[in-house]
Amino acid sequence: MNIEYTCDECKARLFDVEQLPQPEQRQVHAHLAHCDSCREDLAAIWELKRDATGWRAQPVPRWNRRQLFFEPSPWHFRFQWAASFASVVVLVLVLTEARISTIDGLTIDFAGVEDRFVSQTEFTRQLVSLQEQQQATLDTNVRKLTNQQITTNQLLLRTVLDASREERREELGNMLVLWEADQDQRTMSTEESLRYLIASQVQDRREIEQLSSVILDDNRRF
Amino acid sequence: MFGKATDEQLVTKALAGSERAWFSLVRRYEKRLYNYSVRMTGSPDDAMDILQDILMSVYRNLSSYRGDGVFAAWLFRIASFRCTDCLRRRGRQFVSTDQVDVVDDRGLDIDAHIDTNRGIIGMMGKLPTEQRHVIELKFFQNFTFDEISAQLGISANTAKSRVYAALKKMRESDQPQRLLKEGI
Ligand SMILES: [Zn+2]
C-alpha cells in the first residue's frame, strides 16, 4: 500500500522524524535506506541541532530599562526651547529692522524693503499682529512645556513611590529576618533556661536527698 | 502560592498602564532576544542596540497584539522585522568572528563554551541574512515551520528550502577545514 517517498517528500519530513506518525516514520526510513543525499541532509540537521544546544547563553549587559521606556529624552525639551527661542529671535530681528546678508549676495531684510513705502500705521499694525502671533506661538510652546513638566513630575512621583514601596518591602523583609532571628534566639535561651532549671532541680533534689540522709544518719547516731 | 503570570496576563496589565508588568515581560524575553541578536549580527554592541529597538517596537505595538496566538511567536515576528531593518540600515550584514567578544554566562572564561559560541557565530556569519533567519528560528528558537512561515511572511516550503540551502552552504564552507583536518 505504501508508495515510496520521493526525495522532496522525504526531505520535507526530516526535521522532526521522531514526531511523525509511525507509518510515515517507516516510509522515511525506507527511503533513507537507499538515498545517500537524504541521509547526508539528516546528518547535517542532527549536527546543527547538536551545535544549537551547545550555545552558551550570553548575559545581557546592564542597561537602563526605565530610561528607554518611560523617561522622555532630554532632546525633547531642548527642541521645544529651540522653537520658542527661534520665535523670539525673529521678533527681535523684525523689531530692530535687521538685515542679514551673506558674501554670495543673499539678503534677508527683516524690515521688508516694501515696508519703507507703507504708512507708519500700517507698519505698526503689521508689527503688532506679528508680535501677537509670536506671542501665541510662545504661549503654546510654554503650555506644552508645562504639560510635559507635569507629566515628568508625575512620572518622577510614580518612580519615587515605586522605589519607596520597594524599599518598604525590603525593610519589612529585613525586619522579618531580624524578628525570626530574635525568635530563634529567644527559643534557644528559653530552652537553655529550662534545661538549666531541670538540671538545677535535679541537683537540688540530689542535695536535699544527701542532706536528708545526713540528717537521718545523725538522728540514728543520737 | 502565586503562579507565574502568563505572557497574556502581563500584556493585559502592561496595556492597563502597569510598568511592573511590562518590565516582567522585558526581563522574561530580553536574554533570548539578546542572544538572538548576537547570532544574527555577530556583534554584541549591535545586538544591544537591536534588542532595545525590538523591545521599543514591541512596546509601541503592544495594543495590536490580539492575544490570539503565542506571544513569543508575535514577539519574534516583530524581532525579525526590526532585525532585518537594522541590518539593512547599517548597510552591513555581519562582523567578523575575530571581533566577537564572547563571555560565559557566569563571567567565567570557559574555553570550550566560548569556542562553541564563536563557532556558531562564525557559521551564521557565512550565511545570507534570510537563511540565517530561518536557521535561527528553527534551530535556536525551536519554532515550527508554520510559525516561521507566519513570522517571516513566507510559505513553510520556502522556509524549508532556505534551511536546506543553508545546510548546503555550511557543508561547502566546512569542506576545506575537514580536508585539512583529515590531512588530505
Ligand atoms: Zn532522497
Image (cartoon, helix red, strand yellow):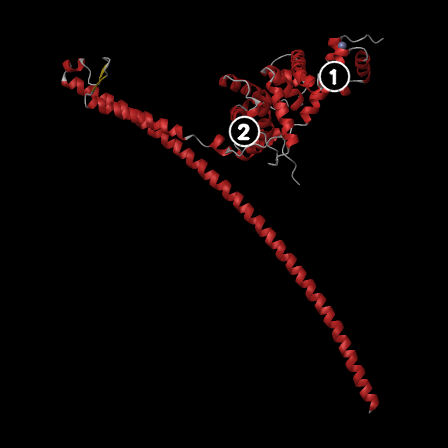
Percent position of residue B18, x then y: 53, 33
The residue wearing badge 1 is A42
**Residue type at numbered disc 1:** Leu
Query: In the current view of this chain or complex, which residue is farthest to the right?
Result: A1
Kind of element beneath mark 1: helix
| Chain to which the residue tagged by mark 2 belongs | B
- In the rendered structure, the answer to whether residue B127 lies left or right of residue A127 reads right
**B173 or A46, which is in the foreground?**
B173
Q: Quadrant of the C terminus of chain B?
A: top right
The residue wearing badge 2 is B15
Query: In the current view of this chain or complex, which residue is farthest to the bottom?
Result: A222
Q: How many marks?
A: 2
Residue A73's tag is: none
Residue B137 visible in the current orientation: yes
- In the rendered structure, the answer to whether residue A123 lies left or right of residue A150 reads left
**B124 or A5, which is in the foreground?**
B124
Percent position of residue A95, x then y: 20, 23
Indicate whether B15 appears above or below B179: below
